[in-house]
Amino acid sequence: MDADAASAPAPATEPPPAESPNGKAATIYDVARVAGVSHQTVSRFIKGYEGIRPETRDRVLAALQQLGYRPNLTARSLRKGTSHRIAALTHAIDQVGPSRIVQGASEAAREAGYLLDIVSLDMADSRSIQEALELVHQLDVAGVLALASTDEMADAFAAADFRVPTFIASEKDDVLTGHPELTNRGFPAVIAHLVDLGHEGFVHIAGPSTWLAARNRSRAFTSALAVHGLDPIAILAGDWSAKSGYDAVARLSQELPATAIVASNDQMALGAMLALTHRGLRVPDDVSVTGVDDIPEAAYFSPPLTTLRIDFAAQGRAAVMELLGGVYEGTPPLQSDLVIRNSTGRVGGSP
């Protein structure tokens, strides 16, 4: 999940923010790279920690001066505020990703002495979005955490006139910067596992195209296949629901062209498995199925689901730390781990 912070304009007497090599304002990660130290060391230096070796302090100071780094003024003003409430704007709270991100954010806020007020938006109703934003303006909050999962969310937040310090947490529509973990580790692990089992024919069930995560997951899937010289047989449209996974597989030709179905989330994988069963096919003997998220029920599917476990809560915690001026300077990569269960097997059911 990638993010941008919105803040009040700096006084005209202050120099403009320094830029890192990618053209953005320099962060403590940029300073750490130039100084050849960890970002934790840079953070301790900025906070005045005395237990840093003189030669290390000199390198950090030189890097700070070279990059012209200055602390986040928005975060600083936030800490000086008297309110201890944070408004979290989100939507689709019934979906796994958004709900777990909010849960992580709530825990981090509580640990920092803040209460997270969750405001769920209906993205299908533009009027409700405006009403929710007006409600936030009326609340006595120290800041706003705007969690953008879709294009509509990102557009609404970008156009909003937030009157308090705000952190907009939004995954970029680019798999290399949005979900590098899924490209470098997550989906490559899924595809390598299936290829090792003899699979060459793959079908992907994608999430809704307006979701940034859905597009990035589909790109990560096709990129992982390309490493093995493979192309997907088909990419089917879903909407995150089990029904959409069922319908996608049910619409395939009678002669199923694939031996492996990779769904963008666990619910669609569940629907796909039921559709395969109704077609007289066995999972995993005839077709292997995988998902993403590792929802609590995934281990109790029939058969238990092989899936990518995603640490969404870490993104929620990082977003709160950004808003509060913590050590995170940019949302950390999404962490994922392959969990192998009984929904994947060798082609043809051989041992």
Image (cartoon, helix red, strand yellow):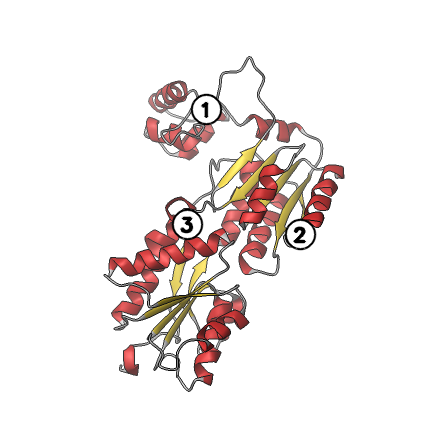
Residue hosting label 1:
50
Helix, strand or loop for disc 1: loop
28 versus 15 height, above or below = below
Helix, strand or loop for disc 2: strand
Image spot of residue 212 (x, y percent): 48, 51
Q: Check whether the beta carbons of the residues at disc 2 and disc 1 lie within 8 A of each other.
A: no
Image spot of residue 348 (x, y percent): 29, 82
Q: Name the N-terminal-most of marks 1 and 3.
A: 1
Q: Residue furthest top?
A: 13
289 versus 143 height, above or below = below
Where is the C terminus found, in terms of image quarters? Answer: bottom left
Name the disc covering residue 120, or none. 2
Residue hosting label 3:
179
Between residue 49 and residue 261, name the one nearer to us.
Answer: 261
Mark 2 or 1, which is nearer the eye? 2
Q: CA distance from mark 2 to mark 3?
A: 24 Å
Q: Residue at x 47, y 53 (%)?
A: 213
Image spot of residue 64 (x, y percent): 41, 22
So how many labels did they put on this image?
3
**Mark 1 Cα-neighbour bin, 10 Å: few <14, some 14–19, many ≥20:** few
Instruction: Kindly indicate the quadrant of the structure image that contains residue 84.
Output: top right
Q: Residue at x 47, y 72 (%)?
A: 248
Say what amino acid the circle numbered 2 marks: Ser
Q: Check whether the beta carbons of the residues at disc 2 and disc 3 lie within 8 A of each other.
A: no
